[in-house]
Image (cartoon, rainbow, N blue to C red):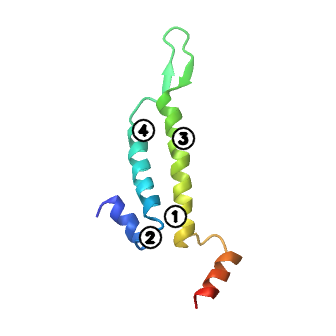
Amino acid sequence: MDRREELLELIGNDPFLVNEVEEMVFLEEQLEKFRKLPQIEIHPKTGAQRATVAAKEYIKYLQQYNNVVKILIRATGTDEADEESPLRKWAKGRQT
């Protein structure tokens, strides 16, 4: 079972979340590529250090990845640390 199938199973193939799963798989692949690239450039004469473009992109992609993870956690109800929100209680009450 690949990562995409694993995530689709987790969300129960919810059509509203399939795009989020696709985004998450894409971001995971990109993050892996950025991890393999140098993250810091060192000036040969002064020894000054600065972040590479890959490091800056990694940070951007990681933030997007974290946002997708939060969306999926909330949507699947696996965020057990939070108590049930009033909106979720209301929605569950309307389903029955």
What residue does disc 2 label? 11
What residue does disc 3 label? 60
Cα gap from disc 1 to disc 3, whole angstroms:
19 Å
Cα gap from disc 1 to disc 2, whole angstroms:
8 Å
Q: Which residue lies at the image location 58% right of the left edge and 69% below the top edge?
A: 79
Q: Secondary structure at mark 2?
A: helix
What residue does disc 1 label? 72
What residue does disc 4 label? 35
Cα gap from disc 4 to disc 2, whole angstroms:
28 Å
View extreme (left): residue: 1
Q: Position of residue 43 (x, y in %)?
A: 51, 14
Q: Position of residue 14 (x, y in %)?
A: 44, 71
Q: Which residue lies at the image location 41% right of the left edge and 43% below the top edge?
A: 30
State if disc 3 and disc 4 touch (CB < 8 Å). no
4 or 2: tag closer to the N-terminus: 2
Q: Secondary structure at mark 1?
A: helix
View extreme (right): residue: 86
Q: Is residue 62 above or below residue 73?
A: above
Kind of residue at badge 4 = Arg
Left-right relation of 30 to 77 = left
1 or 4: tag closer to the N-terminus: 4
Cα gap from disc 2 to disc 3, whole angstroms:
25 Å
Determine crowd level at label 2: few under 14, some 14-19, many 20+ residues with C-alpha closer than 10 A: some
Q: Depth-wise, is mark 1 or mark 4 nearer the camera?
A: 1
Kind of residue at badge 1 = Leu
State if disc 2 and disc 1 touch (CB < 8 Å). yes
For residue 75, which quarter of the picture? bottom right
Q: Which residue lies at the image location 44% right of the left edge and 53% below the top edge?
A: 23
Q: Position of residue 2 (x, y in %)?
A: 30, 60
For residue 19, which quarter of the picture? bottom left
